[in-house]
Image (cartoon, coloured by chain):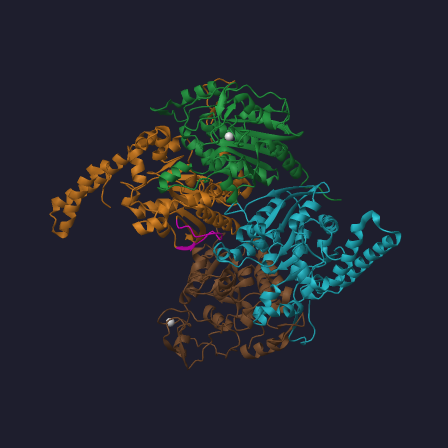
Chain colours: A cyan, B orange, C green, D brown
Amino acid sequence: MPYDLEFERPLADLDKRIQALQRRGDRLRPDERTQLDGLRIQLDQRAREIYRNLTPTQRVQVARHKNRPYTADYINLVSDDFFELHGDRRYADDHAIMGGLASIDGKTIMLIGNQKGRDTKDRLERNFGMAHAEGYRKAQRLMRQAEQFQMPVVTLIDISGASLDLEAEQRGIAQAIAESLFVMAGLRTPIVSIVIGEGGSGGALSTSVADRILMLENTIYTVASPEAAASILWRDSSHAHKAAAAMKITAQELLKLKLIEEIIPEPAGGAHQDYAAAAAAVKSAIIRHISELEQLATEQLLEQRYQRFRAIGVYKRETVGASSPTT
Amino acid sequence: MPYDLEFERPLADLDKRIQALQRRGDRLRPDERTQLDGLRIQLDQRAREIYRNLTPTQRVQVARHKNRPYTADYINLVSDDFFELHGDRRYADDHAIMGGLASIDGKTIMLIGNQKGRDTKDRLERNFGMAHAEGYRKAQRLMRQAEQFQMPVVTLIDISGASLDLEAEQRGIAQAIAESLFVMAGLRTPIVSIVIGEGGSGGALSTSVADRILMLENTIYTVASPEAAASILWRDSSHAHKAAAAMKITAQELLKLKLIEEIIPEPAGGAHQDYAAAAAAVKSAIIRHISELEQLATEQLLEQRYQRFRAIGVYKRETVGASSPTT
Amino acid sequence: MRDESKPALPVVGHNGAHPDAVHTLPTNLAVKCPNCRELLVGKDLERNQKVCPRCGYHFRMDAHERIDMLLDRDSFEEFANDLLSADPLGFVSDAKGPYIAELESKRRATGLNESVVVGKGEIERMPLIIVVMDFRFIGGSMGSVAGEKITLGIERATKDRLPLLIISASGGARMQEGLFALMQMAKTSAALRRLADAGVPFISLLTDPTTGGVFASFSMLGDVILAEPGAVIGFTGPRVIEQAMHQKLPKDTNTSEFVLQRGMIDTIVHRRDLRPTIGRILRLYGAASKRFV
Amino acid sequence: MRDESKPALPVVGHNGAHPDAVHTLPTNLAVKCPNCRELLVGKDLERNQKVCPRCGYHFRMDAHERIDMLLDRDSFEEFANDLLSADPLGFVSDAKGPYIAELESKRRATGLNESVVVGKGEIERMPLIIVVMDFRFIGGSMGSVAGEKITLGIERATKDRLPLLIISASGGARMQEGLFALMQMAKTSAALRRLADAGVPFISLLTDPTTGGVFASFSMLGDVILAEPGAVIGFTGPRVIEQAMHQKLPKDTNTSEFVLQRGMIDTIVHRRDLRPTIGRILRLYGAASKRFV
Ligand SMILES: [Zn+2]
Ligand SMILES: [Zn+2]
């Protein structure tokens, strides 16, 4: 994949030199070969260095990168077989959320994710990954089925925010999200959620009331998109970079705040540089976390999930003194 | 109420004479008073006699009588308080099915029924009582709530058939009916269904997978309306009277076939002649049957309900000999 | 995939009385495809699993053709085949004569005892309970026997914890059995409730046509619902809707494609892919409650 | 019904910073009804439960006005009032300044510690847990403390088996607490799941406005959902939808009447009927698991 983000210019330059040498193939002199190897190491190191120090806004750019692997890509790479289930059995099949039976290492899980769409037509058909009420209701149906057949649920989160149009209101997007939270809170099977790109607002939360929330290294999870937050708090969406920083939305900040369990490392230069490596990391995280959760009795699992969310919140007590926050 | 059906002409004549005498009020001579009393007794006896011997088609006419008490009338007369619950929480509020919390003799039940509508505007708004998918889904929601709060469910059946339009198909009327059957089959609270007018096809069945099915004296319950059946079996809906007879759709025939538990007697001349008396009979039937069902442990209740429907069917075995039907 | 060398079952003639005539084909005659109007040789069509080689139109199949196509060879063990419809209402229509006589003539014409065949079989060596409806038998309609056989199949699946496959092809409830027929919707659905509570998977396959009380009961209760392409699937027949609404319907109303778009089914599967697809689904559910470690 | 002789709570001034300014009224001044433009005397309006006597427009009420209007006199026992918002993100916006300062100014302006008041009380002598949101406090937004107080209310209702009443008035999650705010949607909904499992009834009352993350979590999970007439109720504000869709919306979009028609709520209740209506509902649920004999 090309390095096309502004802060990647040093990488693009290195890459250009590598490409030039590579094009010559077998005709390289031995010293040129050594040079090529050196450049490759340099690119890798430089990419790691740059990506280690991204600003929140740069992290947002990577999370939204048009070449970033989407749910469908992870499904392809992670599962040995996948049978997609369609429809909410009520109104429609929402293509902004996909899900189905996935075989991973001989075990079947229910794999559900937001799907943004790759080309223009696909994006329109999937409403840029912004689900409507029927999408959330499809997800609920699949989760209930997972419970019935004792399959763990894995959700991949990649949604900028819930759909904002009139149809969403007409068919009760808020009700659908609320019901999703309610269903997941009581679902009698392990749930692991992984943010693979953007986790935006209630649209993201509706599929991540999970036992574990993991985030890929270059992803965000936020109460509102930086643009939406800026237009509320700064009355101007062009202040999005300020909102992105102020709201602490990156995987790194959220891990520090103990709002997520783990960061899944990405290949150098981001997941879009190496789909296979990104998927391998996701797969091993899925297996590890589900295996752990499967050790628990169902009542224990539900109690832990309840306490996981019950504990979230930072506040202080007037009588105790205003300076000792309780988490 | 006037006697306006063709077979009621003798009653109409008697009624006319009674009305004429009644109009004179206090000015009646003693012999005229005696005559009036006699006419009243005669009307009552004649009405009972005629109604005892109605043909299936006449029974259909009474079941569909425009003055017949509807669900809303029974709700008013049977319950001390009624709080209507609206909406399927998905798409719309279907006015063809109404339901809510009803207080009867100090106890709260979930009361749900088809509502046809009384005047033209009301009828249109209620689609002549023919529910769409969202109506069945509202009923399911109310039933699940009844289960949650351990309220018995009582359903009043009065529907000529499920809605036949494109919107019904688009929103999955078949799925909604199927899910209703599924929900009721496993609902962990007693269910009593009472046919108060027409019980037509899947639309009626969708709210009558009950522990007891009762029918008012002048009602029908049928796999398809006589008109629809005639147009399939006779290729001409004008043969409806033949279909009505051949399909055995009256309360009396269905009790004989053991497809229902009980017939609730109506006042002389039909329920529409005396709403209060009809409602009193319905109320006492509700209380009696729910009281009986409440004696059962939930697992017993569900087992009995299962066996109630499991046993329905008449067939024979090839090897045993073709003439011994098993019920 | 299906073993193509396996001979198709002998084809039986069909009774032409029903308006939606069953497309059981005379093996050696030319047949016109109702969709693309191509003239097809019956034998070739049989070999192509009764799918028009030109346009992909799926001709109807009878119950034994289905079983033959889907199950591992010789794996089918039928049960409850001794159940015969009685005539609980003493039903006679002066247009069609006595119901009892109609049953008799359908039995002779189809070689079937009823509109439903049920048994145990295997797909890719995985055992399952299979229920197949046959549209030739009074429009695949569901009366007491059909309901009973379906219920027996569901109950066997529940008891033996075997996945259930039901292949629907039906015009709905059988009018001639009145309320007994309607109640089979409740009976089968109640049995499916117990299957679901037991955590046994149920695959529902909708074929042309699946309508009325069958569509509005067990066939819509699958954990996975599949349909063949182009099948008529709907609660009410399109013509009845047009009459009731006094307007023309969009062309694809109440087809497989329509119900897929409306979120009612999981996917449409071409007939040639049915067996491997069902095999995949069985394997996936079979590995459902396994653990990683 | 409400005891009309009971004096209204002292009215506190409101901070005018928010665009959807709260209609807390100066008692002795004239106020123009935003709906019918009638000039109303503040005192008269207070006596009419803040409903325009001419057109029925429902002015917003603050939390203590609600409690005062709905509960039996002196029955309210507040709890968890000592919880104060911290500032988990160290949030500063150069437009609005530090979050901590905003909290301080709202506390002074409203006399409230947070946007939610929770306690135990009685309606027509029936005890219940009541949670009331106050739109004056940063638009009734839900941060850690709001979520915590709502959850404490739900948990108390579960433990003591007392019916729960939540009165929503909120613009949604509080941006200044970032993901902590969003997660309160999950926390409150999870607590409601346990309330439901315990079979304790929950009445949700939606008032003007109920939007965003509050509408998309606990407020839509009521066993009975009521709304006051004419309230703005929706996931997204109508203006935001219009911007996103580049088109004008129908006039009633995202109002009480709209969500009723869409099947999302049970009924709309005029403010004067709220107390007796909630009383009826409490009585009905209270008699739910009784037996006839
Ligand atoms: Zn063709
Ligand atoms: Zn006004």
In-front residue for pair A240/C114: A240
Question: Which residue shows up at 42% across the image and 26% down it?
Answer: C18
Question: Which residue shows up at 53% across the image and 26% down it?
Answer: C63
Q: How many marks?
A: 0
Q: Answer left or right for B307 relative to B13.
A: right
In-front residue for pair D199/B27: D199
**Would you say residue C125 sits in the magenta stretch?**
no
Residue D1, position as x, y percentages in the image: 41, 67
Residue C44, position as x, y percentages in the image: 56, 23
- Name the residue at the bottom extreme: D28
- Name the residue at the right extreme: A30
Residue D221, position as x, y percentages in the image: 53, 57
Magenta: main secondary structure equals loop
Residue D84, position as x, y percentages in the image: 62, 73
For residue B232, say whether it is visible.
Answer: yes
Q: Answer left or right for C20 relative to D99.
A: left
Magenta segment? B81-95
In-front residue for pair D174/D62: D174
**Would you say residue B84 sits in the magenta stretch?**
yes
For residue B317, say whether it is visible.
Answer: no
Quarter of the image where one finds residue A177: bottom right
Q: Is residue B57 above or below residue A220?
A: above
Q: Is residue A261 above or below residue D25?
A: above
